[in-house]
Image: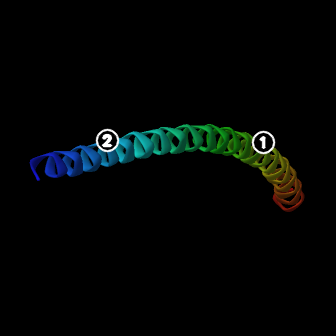
Amino acid sequence: MEAVAWTAIALLATTLIGSFVYLGTRIDAMGGRIEAQGGDLGRRIDALGADLGRRIDAQGADVSGRIDALAARIDQHLDRHAG
């Protein structure tokens, strides 16, 4: 009877150790996939940030040009009325 108990304990221990090894490899694989997706996401965010920066710079230049044009028109208008 004692041999049956030790056999059962050994089988349970082997199953438990095997489960931990299996789960460990699965967790490592998930970690690698998460790192890869994180790197891809970081590159996409950087690309979107650069694109947004270019758009803002372009709009800033456009607004600056419009402000300069309006300032010139106001100066002309004031010159006409200041006589």
Mark with earlier residue (1, 2): 2
User: Could you say where residue 14 lies in the image, as x and y percent from the top left?
Assistant: 31, 42
The label on residue 15 is none
Count of labels shown? Answer: 2
Q: From the viewer's perspective, is 59 left or right of 45?
A: right
User: Could you say where residue 6 lies in the image, as x and y percent from the top left?
Assistant: 16, 45
Q: Nearer the viewer, mark 1 or mark 2?
A: 2
Q: Residue at x 39, y 39 (%)?
A: 21
Residue 53 appears in which quarter of the rendering?
top right
The label on residue 17 is 2
Using a 10 Å C-alpha cutoff, classify the residue at mark 1 as few (fewer than 14 neighbours), some (14 to 19) or many (20 or more).
few
Q: Nearer the viewer, residue 38 or 33?
A: 33
Q: Nearer the viewer, residue 1 or 13?
A: 1
Q: Which residue, given by chain and number where applicable, does mark 1 sit on?
A: 54
Q: Residue at x 68, y 44 (%)?
A: 49
User: Secondary structure beneath disc 1?
Assistant: helix
User: Could you say where residue 80 lies in the image, as x and y percent from the top left?
Assistant: 90, 58
Q: The residue under label 1 is which amino acid type? A: Arg
Q: From the viewer's perspective, is 36 left or right of 51?
A: left
User: Secondary structure beneath disc 2?
Assistant: helix
Q: Nearer the viewer, residue 70 or 38?
A: 38
User: Could you say where residue 27 lies in the image, as x and y percent from the top left?
Assistant: 45, 44
Q: The residue under label 2 is which amino acid type? A: Ile
Using a 10 Å C-alpha cutoff, classify the residue at mark 2 as few (fewer than 14 neighbours), some (14 to 19) or many (20 or more).
few
**Residue found farthest to the left:** 2
Q: Nearer the viewer, residue 13 or 38?
A: 13
The CA distance from mark 1 to mark 2 is 55 Å
Q: From the viewer's perspective, is 36 left or right of 77?
A: left
Q: Please tell me whether residue 83 is drawn above or below residue 19 in the rendered image.
A: below
Q: Residue at x 70, y 44 (%)?
A: 44
